[in-house]
Structures are given as C-alpha cells and as structure tokens.
Image (cartoon, rainbow, N blue to C red):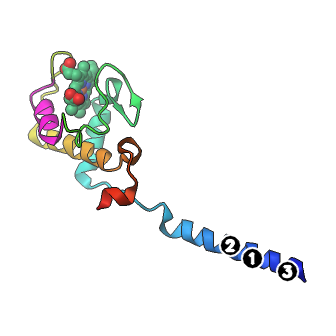
Amino acid sequence: MKKIWIFLTLFFAFTTYSSWIYTGATDYGTVMTTRQQLGKKIYQEYNCQSCHQIFGLGGYLGPELTTAISDKTRGEAYVKAFIENGGGTRMPNFHFSKEQTEALVDYLKYVDANAFSYKNTTPNETEK
Ligand code: HEC
C-alpha cells in the first residue's frame, strides 16, 4: 500500500513539473522581427562574425558586439554611426544603405535584449 503512494507522489510531481516546463518556463526573451531577421542575414552574409563575437563566438580582430547597444560607452547611436560611416581604420567600409544599417542595428538590439547572462540579469529583471 505504501508503494502506491510513493508512485502517485512521484507521478504527480513528474506531470506537474513537465507541464510547467512545456507550457512556458523557458519561454522568455523576445521573438525576432522581420527587420531583425534581415539584420541577422546581413550580419551573416557580410561575415561580421569573422572579426566580431556575439555571445563569445566569432573572430577577435574587432570588439565583442553582444552588449554594444546597452553599453554606456557605446550605445545605439554610436553603433549606428559607426556602421553608417563605414567603420574605423581596420574595419572595412561595406557602404551599407540606410535600410541595411538600420536592420543591422536592429539585429544587434535583439541580441542585446537577450544577453541576460552577459548583463548578469534574469529575463524577468530585464523585462521591467
Ligand atoms: C575585417 C574585420 C571586420 C569585419 C569583417 C567587420 N568588422 Fe566591425 N570592427 C572591426 C574592427 C577592427 C573594429 C574596431 C574599430 C576599428 O579599428 O575599425 C570594428 C568595430 C565595429 C563596431 C564598433 C564597436 C565598438 O565596440 O567600437 C561595430 C558596431 C561593428 N564593427 C560592426 C560590424 C558589422 C555589423 C560588421 C558586418 C557587416 C562588421 N563590423 C564587420 C573589424 C571588422
């Protein structure tokens, strides 16, 4: 008789936990907009990752871009101006259009908004 209660307790715990996990416990962060997807495509097509890292992955010639948007010393306006004006001395000038630049910045915004571990925050804190 004791065994059935142990079984029921474990079964109940398992089903409760499973339904919690599968109905949204990991469902945080934001969904990519069409423009952010375009930005990601440009980022990949122009091989930005050969020189830059996002979430630690990529080349090391250029700076890490994961939190470029929320950084106090960089920020959106700086990133936009940088890409628009064709980089610095070592970064090539890609001659991006206004739309391409905006899509790239928008993609970097998406990355930044989901960089919880980099900013040492939890999803809930960031959403506030
Ligand atoms: C050949 C290597 C290379 C490639 C490819 C490259 N970059 Fe860069 N990038 C750099 C370097 C190096 C810097 C640092 C400034 C400098 O010396 O020009 C930089 C700086 C930046 C910055 C300023 C960030 C900061 O912290 O100052 C942004 C934003 C940026 N790059 C975006 C991009 C994007 C977007 C692409 C792809 C379209 C790209 N880069 C492709 C080398 C590269």
Viewer-closest of 92 and 74: 74
The residue most toward the bottom is 1
Viewer-closest of 84 and 115: 115
Q: Position of residue 124 (x, y in %)?
A: 37, 60
Mark closer to the chain start, 3 or 1: 3
Query: Which residue is disc 1 drawn over?
Result: 9
Q: CA distance from mark 3 to mark 2?
A: 14 Å
Query: Which residue is disc 3 drawn over?
Result: 4
| 99 lies above or below 33 | above
The quadrant of the picture occupied by the N terminus is bottom right
Dots 3 and 2: beta carbons under 8 Å? Answer: no
The magenta segment is: 74-87
**Within 10 Å of the Cα at label 3, are there few (<14), some (14-19), or many (20+) other Cα atoms?**
few
The kind of residue on which mark 3 rests is Ile
* Residue 80 position by quadrant: top left
Dots 2 and 1: beta carbons under 8 Å? Answer: yes
Secondary structure of the residue carrying tag 3 is: helix
Query: Which residue is disc 2 drawn over?
Result: 13
Dots 3 and 1: beta carbons under 8 Å? Answer: no
Q: Is residue 83 magenta?
A: yes
Q: CA distance from mark 2 to mark 1?
A: 6 Å
Residue 109 shown left or right of residue 16 in the figure: left
Viewer-closest of 124 and 96: 124
Q: CA distance from mark 3 to mark 1?
A: 9 Å
Q: Residue at x 15, y 24 (%)?
A: 87
Prevailing secondary structure of the magenta residues: helix
Mark closer to the chain start, 3 or 2: 3
The kind of residue on which mark 1 rests is Thr
